[in-house]
Amino acid sequence: MQLHVSPQDGVPIYLQIVNQVKFLIASGRLKPDEELPSIRSLAEQLLVNPNTVARAYRELEAAGVVYKRRTAG
């Protein structure tokens, strides 16, 4: 899963992540029950704070777009 964020975009980084994950799901590139990268690994890939990724994941979960599985990520 390749995501790209831009601090100069004017959109908060966590919202950029949320919007891109929603797009990947809508376009079929992210399949149902496919695991998202861990918070730490995505933060390292995007060079952002892990709290930013965690917030994006919480937003996605609250919207019902993704769900958490115990001990599975």
Image (cartoon, helix red, strand yellow):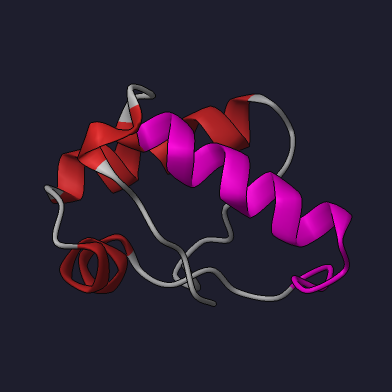
Residue appearing at x 57%, y 53% in the figure: 68
Quarter of image, res 35: bottom right
Q: At 14% across and 61% down in the image, what residue appears?
A: 47
Q: Position of residue 33 (x, y in %)?
A: 77, 70
Looking at the magenta stretch, what is its main secondary structure?
A: helix
Q: Residue 8, position in %: x, y?
A: 24, 34
Q: Residue at x 73, y 41 (%)?
A: 65
The quarter of the picture where residue 13 lies is top left
Residue 59 horizontal side relative to residue 4, left or right: right
30 vs 20, nearest the viewer = 20
Q: Is residue 2 above or below residue 60?
A: below
Residue 60 visible to the viewer = yes
- Tell me if residue 19 is in the magenta stretch: yes
| Residue 22 lies within the magenta run | yes
- Give x and y (percent) for residue 61: 60, 36
Q: Which region of the structure is painted magenta?
A: 14-33
Q: Is residue 35 left or right of residue 51?
A: right
Q: Nearer the viewer, residue 13 or 31?
A: 13
Q: Quadrant of residue 30?
A: bottom right
Q: Quadrant of the N terminus?
A: bottom right
Tell me which residue sits at (53%, 68%) in the image: 36
